[in-house]
Amino acid sequence: PGTVREIAPGVLWLRMPLPFALNHINLWALADEDEQGPGWAIVDTGTKTPEALAAWRQLIAPDGPLAATPQGARITRVLCTHMHPDHVGMAGWLTRKFQCRLWMTRLEYLTCRTLVADTGREAPAEAIRFYCQAGWSEEALDVYRTRFGGYGKYMHAMPDGFRRLSEGDVLRIGAHGWRVVVGRGHSPEHACLVCDDLGLMISGDQVLPRISSNVSVFPTEPDANPLGEWIESIARLRATLSDDLLVLPAHGEPFRGLHARLDRLAHGHERGLERLRRSLAEAPKRAIDVFGALFVRPIGSTGDLLGMATGESLAHLNCLLALGEVVVEPDADGVRWYRLRPN
């Protein structure tokens, strides 16, 4: 934290601490210039924590590694790949401090604003019903009620306006063009940035070197098929992006071998779906009953892992529903039971 490493001319790797099990995020500074002179375009920001704030103050100090002028650091714009707090949490602080614009895709910005608005609210009845249908216990629901609305805890107040990123846009950042490539599944409209001149891809959470990004269904859209979107995105990225790119991910180290990594991610989900089919062939199951088919580590009966595992299990179940392979039936208590469709 507070230091940089040059990846390519005018491209700096920054690392920020995170207060989660995944304890870091990679951010990127791109040499930029506008009508006011040289500066840095920042890609992703870290969470709102004292540790992240201290690291940013060190980075932008007059003698810090982002000092772009005799007066110190200038940030020309802040680009966020997607709406999760580790990527956008400090965006409000940075854009206000440097009087610059936030650049995001529309769905990511609006989803972020919606989740921030939940801060301090009671858990809605629809969400409680959603997790009841998945098979959660009353104890788990009580923990969820207590933790609901915590998204804003790691967020500085968002700017009230933004500059929209769209698929296919080419942004002139400094001396190079960066192409926007949108992926879906992990989040609604995740923006990756590809610079063919430099042979680089800033992949955010869309492609990670060692872990698979969480792909979940949430109470706001219980019938969504994010896993179908994720699998389609993997195929499209593999078909359209060069295998020669150096991938700059949000977590882990930069890596080469994009196509092999995309193949591995696709095969991982294909294997998960096949294990899920075998599990459902044994007997009808609730969402919480298929954890063993999808996850290696045990999932507790309460807490953050339960929520993530339930969302990812539902993503796999909804994918099989969309394929017509599964039917779902509620019992007398409204709990949803999934079974393979008879041949």
Image (cartoon, grey):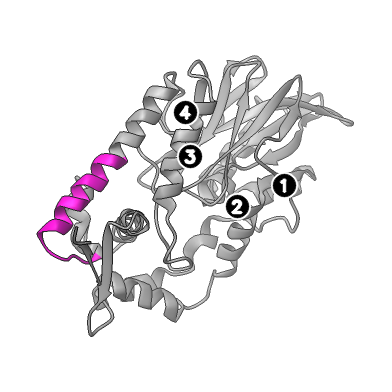
Position of residue 201 in the picture relative to residue 287 (left or right): right
Judge whether residue 315 is colored magenta.
no
Q: Nearer the viewer, residue 267 or 88?
A: 267
Residue 12, percent from left and from top: 60, 23
Instruction: Please name the amino acid that badge 4 sits on.
Output: Arg
Q: CA distance from mark 3 to mark 4?
A: 8 Å
For residue 22, above or below residue 129: above
Q: Main secondary structure of the magenta part?
A: helix
For residue 155, above or below residue 194: below
Magenta-tinted stretch: 269-286
Of circles 4 and 1, the one toward us is: 4
Tag of residue 238: 4
Position of residue 282 in the picture relative to residue 223 (left or right): left
Q: Are marks 3 and 2 in contact (CB under 8 Å)?
A: no
Q: Which residue is mark 1?
A: 164
Q: Which residue is mark 2?
A: 108
How crowded pointer 2 is (Cα within 10 Å; few <14, some 14-19, many 20+) is rated as: many
Earlier in the chain: of badge 4 and badge 1, it is: 1
Q: Are marks 3 and 4 in contact (CB under 8 Å)?
A: no
Earlier in the chain: of badge 2 and badge 4, it is: 2
For residue 258, above or below residue 334: above
How crowded pointer 1 is (Cα within 10 Å; few <14, some 14-19, many 20+) is rated as: some
Instruction: Please name the amino acid that badge 2 sits on.
Output: Glu
Q: Which residue is mark 3?
A: 233
How crowded pointer 4 is (Cα within 10 Å; few <14, some 14-19, many 20+) is rated as: some
Of circles 3 and 1, the one toward us is: 3
Q: CA distance from mark 4 to mark 1?
A: 25 Å
Earlier in the chain: of badge 1 and badge 2, it is: 2
Position of residue 85 in the picture relative to residue 173 (left or right): left
Tell me what residue is drawn at x 78 percent, y 43 percent: 100
Earlier in the chain: of badge 3 and badge 2, it is: 2
